[in-house]
Image (cartoon, rainbow, N blue to C red):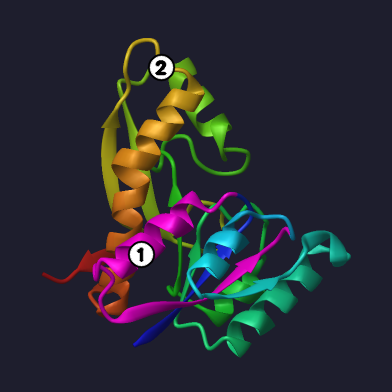
């Protein structure tokens, strides 16, 4: 059984999707063993506690720079014996120290179809504002491996979502969460925990 450690910064809706999927038996071969928050008031911590999951806080402002914070996070993940690290609304930058300690063992869900609307500055509502400003007819979500380059790791799963006339960034954000993020993130976690994802030449291969 693989240990899944989830990193959070805010409300924890993606964490809740993972918890619910685990309860339904949809995450095979893995268990959420710890939730680590970058903010002490992150509601995601309450979600974890309400479900009997261990919590830790690692507050970004308590550290002088990204390197020191990344080193502390790497050490915390090693202490928790993490087999898989999941970014679930984790808004804090980590450097290569963490990626190198957990190569192809860290995944993130991004609220767009990478390579569109991704990279530095594309987070939260900014992603959906950019998509609507461009007039795209389809957006969606992507689960990918985390590397030291923002949103550039191998893509694991994607799901498209229709953009509707009159959408606001908030409305589109909610639709993408409900129809894509909350579905493909648990799927990707389960595939990983079953050892069904392999990376070959920078591209993921998923076993049947």
For the point 34% across and 37% down, the residue is 140
Q: Which residue is mark 2?
A: 167
Q: How far across and down, in percent of the image, does residue 36 sit?
A: 62, 69
- Say which quarter of the image contains residue 34: bottom right
In front: 126, or 8? Answer: 8
Q: Which residue is mark 1?
A: 202
Mark 2 element type: loop
Image quarter where the N terminus lies is bottom left
Which residue is farthest top?
Answer: 166
Residue 11 visible, this angle? yes
For the point 70% across and 61% down, the residue is 38
Mark 1 element type: loop
**Label 1: few (<14), some (14–19) or many (≥20) C-alpha neighbours in 10 Å:** few
Q: How far across and down, in percent of the image, does residue 69 sit?
A: 76, 69
Which residue is farthest front?
Answer: 50
Numbered range of the magenta stretch: 11-39
**Label 2: few (<14), some (14–19) or many (≥20) C-alpha neighbours in 10 Å:** few
N-term mark: 2 or 1: 2
Which residue is farthest left?
Answer: 208
For the point 64% across and 55% down, the residue is 9
In front: 4, or 191? Answer: 4
């Amino acid at each position: 059984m693989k240990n899944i450690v989830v990193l959070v910064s805010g409300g924890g809706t993606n964490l809740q999707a993972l918890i619910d999927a685990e309860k339904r038996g949809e995450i095979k071969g893995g268990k959420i063993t710890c939730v680590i928050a970058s903010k002490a008031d992150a509601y995601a911590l309450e979600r974890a506690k309400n479900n009997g999951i261990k919590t830790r806080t690692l507050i970004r402002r308590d550290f002088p720079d990204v390197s020191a914070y990344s080193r502390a996070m790497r050490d915390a993940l090693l202490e928790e014996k993490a087999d898989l690290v999941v970014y679930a609304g984790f808004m804090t930058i980590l450097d290569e120290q963490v990626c190198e300690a957990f190569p192809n063992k860290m995944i993130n869900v991004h609220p767009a179809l990478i390579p569109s609307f991704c990279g530095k500055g594309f987070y939260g509502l900014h992603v959906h504002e950019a998509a609507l400003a461009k007039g795209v007819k389809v957006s969606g979500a992507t689960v990918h491996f985390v590397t030291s380059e923002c949103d550039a790791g191998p893509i694991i799963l994607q799901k498209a979502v229709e953009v509707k006339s009159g959408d606001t960034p908030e409305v589109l954000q909610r639709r993408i969460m409900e129809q894509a993020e909350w579905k493909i993130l648990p799927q990707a976690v389960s595939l990983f925990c079953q050892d069904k994802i392999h990376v070959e030449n920078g591209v993921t291969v998923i076993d049947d």
